């Protein structure tokens, strides 16, 4: 991750008006435990492109409330598909899961064995949401598709 951070920083220095470079720097900075630098990079990306809104950050307890509320608003069919699943929230995918093939930007991951667990990745969902209302909609869509 530190090598990727250096490459992303260099890309931003070479092309300071490239929103995608700044967004990538934001993602990598978050993984390297630099949340303030991450949010600065995301803000820069949002200033350069409307496709990249600044993340809507909420505290973990409030995020859990949003998730529980979204579950309650799912269709009957979606609730049935999730009724046996344990819904867990992690900040980001674990590095070993990324090494095993999970995208570091994944919104969720579902493991059905040995037990059914759906994990939502709070930071990655926030990174794609410009407002709390956007975050609520994205959480709902992610749950409905699981």
Image (tube, grey):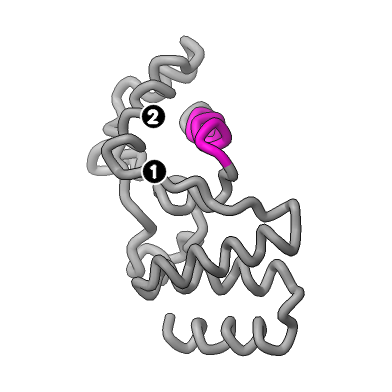
Q: Position of residue 28 (x, y in %)?
A: 48, 72
- Does 6 appear above or below 131? below
**Residue 66, labelled with which disc?**
2
The stretch of residues the image draws in magenta is 131-142
- Does 130 appear above or below 66? below
Q: Position of residue 5 (x, y in %)?
A: 50, 82
Question: Count the marks: how many?
Answer: 2
**Residue 58, labelled with which disc?**
1
**Crowding at mark 2 (Cα within 10 Å: few <14, some 14-19, many 20+):** some
**Crowding at mark 1 (Cα within 10 Å: few <14, some 14-19, many 20+):** some
Q: Regarding mark 2 in the picture, which secondary structure is present there?
A: helix
Look at the image and say whether residue 61 sits in the magenta stretch.
Answer: no
Q: Does label 2 or label 1 sit earlier along the sequence? A: 1
Quarter of the figure with residue 108: top left
Q: Quadrant of the N terminus?
A: bottom left
For the residues bearing labels 2 and 1, Cβ distance under 8 angstroms: yes
Q: Regarding mark 1 in the picture, which secondary structure is present there?
A: loop
Is residue 146 visible in the rendered image? The answer is: no
- Does 121 appear above or below 64? below
Task: Say which residue appears at 59% left-offset and 44% top-offset.
Answer: 130
């Amino acid at each position: 991750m530190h090598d990727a951070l250096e490459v992303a920083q260099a890309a931003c220095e070479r092309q300071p008006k490239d929103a995608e470079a700044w967004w990538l720097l934001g993602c990598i900075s978050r993984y390297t435990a630099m949340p303030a630098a991450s949010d600065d990079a995301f803000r820069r990306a949002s200033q350069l492109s409307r496709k990249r809104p600044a993340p809507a950050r909420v505290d973990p307890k409030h995020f859990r409330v949003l998730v529980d509320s979204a579950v309650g608003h799912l269709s009957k069919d979606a609730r049935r598909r999730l009724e046996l699943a344990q819904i867990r929230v992690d900040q980001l995918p674990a590095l070993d899961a990324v090494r095993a093939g999970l995208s570091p930007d994944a919104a969720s991951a579902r493991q059905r064995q040995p037990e059914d667990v759906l994990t939502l990745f709070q930071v990655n969902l926030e990174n794609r949401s410009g407002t709390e209302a956007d975050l609520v909609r994205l959480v709902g869509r992610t749950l409905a598709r699981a």
